[in-house]
């Protein structure tokens, strides 16, 4: 125990706190008029045990029901799945119709600096998003 | 001489004088603690009376793995918490007045009692932790149980409380100690 701890102890001991006979009489009288709770601890534990027992019983019963239902259920009859008719695959690659799709290709022409173009694109995207949102609201 | 826990068992087995012995052992210690925490002497008396009544009523629920002192201080702290009393603060001097039970139980030559300083500087929980550690010699584990706090909280609070008091008693307060908060 260092000096600081000694001082804490000594200063606490220096506090005058004597229980007066009147206070002791009050305490004794209160205790005589107090009924003691009947073993609150063990009762709580037994209640807790009962809760566990009922929970475990319920769980076991649930598992048993699930097992019985699954055991008595007949196996599902095999279902014949119709096979989709697929077009025959041509043997030669030359049999494919070579029709090139028409692409609408436009070259990007930046008339303004890239940053400005980006802002314009973002504005277009926002407009498109608002338009879609309005359509959705109108539909639903 | 029977231990506190043996007296509890004897009381539960119907020995009427066993609880009286426990009251004899703890009445002075509890009153001293409660006087330093209550706003008035009457509040401290009410708190000690309620503490013994509750302890007697719920003695059957006492867990023998605890120390009896830990358990009864926990009850006392709960009774204190129920009392309506002014908040502690460093600037509030209303508690440190002529009617203050703590000042009244200090001899005039002991006006620099460290517990007066502790009550001014520390939070209620930090003060209780310090008292239980250095006056009642409770372990950190028991203090944690009594205050319903973690052991880490208790260790940190004790360390900070001790540091803050040491700085104050040394005549100054460091900026670091001022910044620390409690509770």
Image (tube, coloured by chain):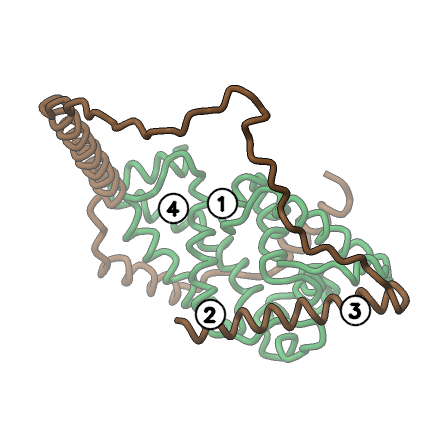
- Residue at 57% over, 46% down: B136
Q: Nearer the viewer, residue B39 or B124?
A: B124
The chain containing the residue under callout 2 comes to: A
Q: Is the Cβ of the residue at disc 1 closer than 8 Å to that at disc 3?
A: no
Q: Which residue is mark 3?
A: A119
Q: Which residue is mark 4?
A: B22
The chain containing the residue under callout 4 comes to: B
- Residue at 52% over, 71% down: A133
Q: Quadrant of the C terminus of chain B?
A: bottom right
Q: How much space separates mark 4 and mark 1, taking CA atoms?
A: 20 Å
- Residue at 28% over, 57% down: A31
What colour has chain B?
green
Horizontal arrangement in the rendering, residue B162 relative to residue A47 (left or right): right
- Label 4 or label 1, whichever lies nearer to me, is 1
Q: How much space separates mark 4 and mark 3, taking CA atoms?
A: 83 Å
Q: Is residue A80 above or below residue B166?
A: above
Q: Which residue is mark 2?
A: A136
Residue B30 in the image: state x and y as whole percent: 49, 55
The chain containing the residue under callout 3 comes to: A
Residue B48 in the image: state x and y as whole percent: 42, 61
Which badge, 2 or 3, comes first in the chain's sequence?
A: 3
Q: How many other residues sit within 10 Å of disc 3, few (<14), some (14-19) or many (≥20)?
A: few
- Label 4 or label 3, whichever lies nearer to me, is 3
Classify mark 3: helix, strand or loop. helix
Classify mark 1: helix, strand or loop. helix
Q: Which residue is mark 1?
A: B145
Which badge, 4 or 1, comes first in the chain's sequence?
A: 4
């Amino acid at each position: 125990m260092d000096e600081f701890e000694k001082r804490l102890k000594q200063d606490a001991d220096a506090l005058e706190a004597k229980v007066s006979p009147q206070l002791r009489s009050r305490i004794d009288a209160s205790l005589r008029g107090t009924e003691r709770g009947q073993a609150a601890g063990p009762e709580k534990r037994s209640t807790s045990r009962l809760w566990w027992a009922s929970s475990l019983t319920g769980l076991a019963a649930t598992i048993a029901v699930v097992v019985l239902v699954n055991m008595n259920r007949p196996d599902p009859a095999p279902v014949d799945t119709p096979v989709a008719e697929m077009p025959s695959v041509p043997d030669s690659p030359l049999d494919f119709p070579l029709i090139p799709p028409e692409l609408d290709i436009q070259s990007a022409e930046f008339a303004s600096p890239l940053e400005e173009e980006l802002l314009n694109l973002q504005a277009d995207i926002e407009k498109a998003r608002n338009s879609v949102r309005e359509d959705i609201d109108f539909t639903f | 001489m029977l231990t506190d826990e043996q007296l509890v068992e004897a009381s539960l087995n119907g020995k009427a004088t066993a609880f009286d012995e426990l009251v004899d052992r703890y009445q002075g210690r509890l009153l001293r603690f409660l006087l330093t925490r209550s706003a008035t002497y009457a509040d401290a008396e009410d708190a000690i009376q309620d503490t013994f009544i509750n302890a007697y009523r719920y003695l059957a629920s006492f867990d023998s793995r605890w120390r009896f002192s830990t358990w009864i201080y926990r009850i006392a702290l709960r009774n204190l918490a129920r009392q309506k009393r002014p908040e502690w603060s460093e600037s509030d001097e209303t508690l440190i007045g002529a009617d203050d039970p703590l000042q009244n139980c200090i001899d005039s030559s002991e006006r620099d009692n460290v517990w007066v300083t502790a009550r001014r500087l520390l939070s209620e929980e930090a003060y209780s932790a310090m008292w239980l550690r250095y006056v009642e010699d409770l372990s950190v584990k028991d203090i944690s149980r009594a205050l319903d706090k973690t052991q880490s909280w208790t260790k940190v609070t004790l360390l900070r409380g001790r540091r803050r008091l040491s700085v104050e008693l040394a005549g100054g307060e460091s900026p670091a100690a001022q910044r620390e908060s409690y509770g």
